[in-house]
């Protein structure tokens, strides 16, 4: 059995590889140094663990890795999870002219960006909820 | 000479992409080489995680889908 069709890779990747009917949803978190960026990162990882999508490296897009840019372009949907109104992840998508994304933002949930503070489980759960809702809405559109 | 690479560990969709790419190259009348890249480390080295993917002359053209022969012909032009 080919590796992608086995169980060694995430469900999302396997379904795209084997022509399964699932949508290719990619998850990009800003994953910066702030507490809200940590929340974005952990929420994206939670969604990946739930099988809602495959987390992919935002830094690769920022670094203009051509195959990574094309991967985002060809996804059915990219979830862009930013920590704050700086919108770093969204701006990277915009710079590449990639339009098939939907954004969720941690500070929109009333969570403050604070230096030297760690994310709490409750905040991660709230961001994951917002991200799930954004994905569902975008896939319905 | 066009260098066509099909990235994928060998599932049916990967094989289909290789067939379509070869047919497109023949129809376009271009000289080409076709390589099936099945090694997962080489595949991820292209920045590709969803397969199959099509690479022409080192540039990743499509990811996670099988384009039509017409689309691939345009990429080979
Ligand atoms: S969006 Fe805000 S939290 Fe995220 S990396 Fe940019 S500045 Fe940091």
Image (cartoon, coloured by chain):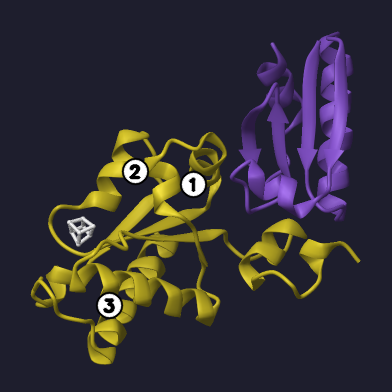
* Residue that protrudes farthest toward the front in the picture: A116
Can see residue B5? yes
- Residue ID at (28%, 90%): A121
Q: Which residue in the structure is indicated by mark 1? A: A72
Q: Residue at x 63, y 53 (%)?
A: B49
Label 2 CB-ligand 1 distance < 8 A: no
* Chain letter of the yellow region: A
Q: Which residue is mark 3?
A: A127
Q: Colour of chain B?
A: purple
Check if mark 2's residue and mark 3's residue have beta carbons within 8 Å.
no
Q: Is mark 3 within 8 Å of ligand 1?
A: no
Q: Picture coordinates of residue A136 (x, y %)?
A: 40, 70
Name the chain letter of the residue that bears numbered label 3: A
Mark 2 highlights which residue? A93
Residue A36: numbered disc: none
State yes or no: discs 3 and 1 in contact (Cβ < 8 Å).
no
Q: Secondary structure at mark 3?
A: helix
- Label 3 vs 1, first from the N-terminus: 1
């Amino acid at each position: 059995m080919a590796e992608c069709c086995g169980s060694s890779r995430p469900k999302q990747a396997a379904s795209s590889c084997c022509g399964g009917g699932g949508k290719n949803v990619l998850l990009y978190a800003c994953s910066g140094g702030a507490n809200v960026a940590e929340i974005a990162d952990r929420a994206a990882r939670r969604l990946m663990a739930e099988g809602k999508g495959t987390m992919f490296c935002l830094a690769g897009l920022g670094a203009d890795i051509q195959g990574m840019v094309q991967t985002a372009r060809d996804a059915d949907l990219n979830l862009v999870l930013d920590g704050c109104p700086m919108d770093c992840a969204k701006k990277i998508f915009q710079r590449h002219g990639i339009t098939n994304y939907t954004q969720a933002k941690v500070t929109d949930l009333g969570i403050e960006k604070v230096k030297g503070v760690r994310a709490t489980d409750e905040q991660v759960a709230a961001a994951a909820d917002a991200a799930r809702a954004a994905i569902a809405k975008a896939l319905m559109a | 000479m066009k260098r066509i690479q099909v990235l994928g560990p060998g599932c049916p969709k990967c094989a289909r992409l290789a067939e379509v790419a070869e047919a497109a190259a023949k129809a376009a009348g271009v000289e080409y080489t076709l390589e099936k890249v099945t090694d997962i480390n080489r595949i991820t080295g292209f920045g590709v995680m969803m397969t199959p993917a099509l690479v022409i002359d080192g540039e990743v053209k499509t990811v996670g889908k099988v384009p039509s022969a017409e689309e691939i012909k345009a990429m080979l032009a």
